[in-house]
Image (tube, rainbow, N blue to C red):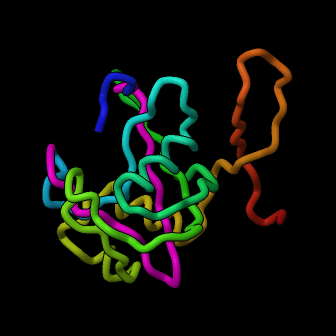
């Protein structure tokens, strides 16, 4: 893992649900050591949050995903963290044997009942499973030199 291009103030994670199972990774360091968490990581300079999520999932789990809707945002005085729901595209889940020691698909209800799944991960799994989307991706072309842009906006889930 190269850290020279890492933006330590921006991070992403994603919840992937397939066949009523959620993909989790057992973290090997820091506050989350030994815990089963949703995969993610820091955004590199010059990378969008969506690109970072795709890269992080591939690096950590060998799973190809497509970011969907924003299901959570956490801000503090030092950084921000965005959580997406993400669609499983392809791949067989396997550990990177570095940032995680195992990657596994767990039944959603079982994952939510486990003591080794942190509260933030549980909240994001619940949000993804229940499709409680406050912000959803919207097509947007800014026509500016600062592209690409991504726009997420509030929608009414009853108006599909």
Of the pair 74 and 137, the residue shown nearer to us: 137
Residue 74 visible to an observer of this rendering: no
What is the residue that sits farthest to the top in this orientation? 145
Q: Is residue 30 left or right of residue 127?
A: left
Kindly indicate the quadrant of the structure image that contains residue 119.
Answer: bottom left
Residue at coordinates 71% horizontally, 29% vertically from top-left?
148
Based on the picture, tell me whether residue 26 belongs to the magenta stretch.
yes
Q: Quadrant of the C terminus?
A: bottom right
Based on the picture, tell me whether residue 63 belongs to the magenta stretch.
no
Q: Is residue 135 left or right of residue 72?
A: right
Of the pair 92 and 73, the residue shown nearer to us: 92
Residue 142 in the image, given as x and y percentages of width and height: 82, 25
Label the magenta part by its dominant secondary structure.
strand
Residue 145 in the image, given as x and y percentages of width and height: 76, 15
Residue at coordinates 60% horizontally, 57% vertically from top-left?
66
Kindly indicate the quadrant of the structure image that contains residue 156.
Answer: bottom right
Q: Quadrant of the N terminus?
A: top left
Residues drawn in magenta: 7-30
Residue at coordinates 69% horizontally, 50% vertically from top-left?
136
Residue at coordinates 18% horizontally, 67% vertically from top-left?
116
Residue 108 in the image, given as x and y percentages of width and height: 40, 78
């Amino acid at each position: 893992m190269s850290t020279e291009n890492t933006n330590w103030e921006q991070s992403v994670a994603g919840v992937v649900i397939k066949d009523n199972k959620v993909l989790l990774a057992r973290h090997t360091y820091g506050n989350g050591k030994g815990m089963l968490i949703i995969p993610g990581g820091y955004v590199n300079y010059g990378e969008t949050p969506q690109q970072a999520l795709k890269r992080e999932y591939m690096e950590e789990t060998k799973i190809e995903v497509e970011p969907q809707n924003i299901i959570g945002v956490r801000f503090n005085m030092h950084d921000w963290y965005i959580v997406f729901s993400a669609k499983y595209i392809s791949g067989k889940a396997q550990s990177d044997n570095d940032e995680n020691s195992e990657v596994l698909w767990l039944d959603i209800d079982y994952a939510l009942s486990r003591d080794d799944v942190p509260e933030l991960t549980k909240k994001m799994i619940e949000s993804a499973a229940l499709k409680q989307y406050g912000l959803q991706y919207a097509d947007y072309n800014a026509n500016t030199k600062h592209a690409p842009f991504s726009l997420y906006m509030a929608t009414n889930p009853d108006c599909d």
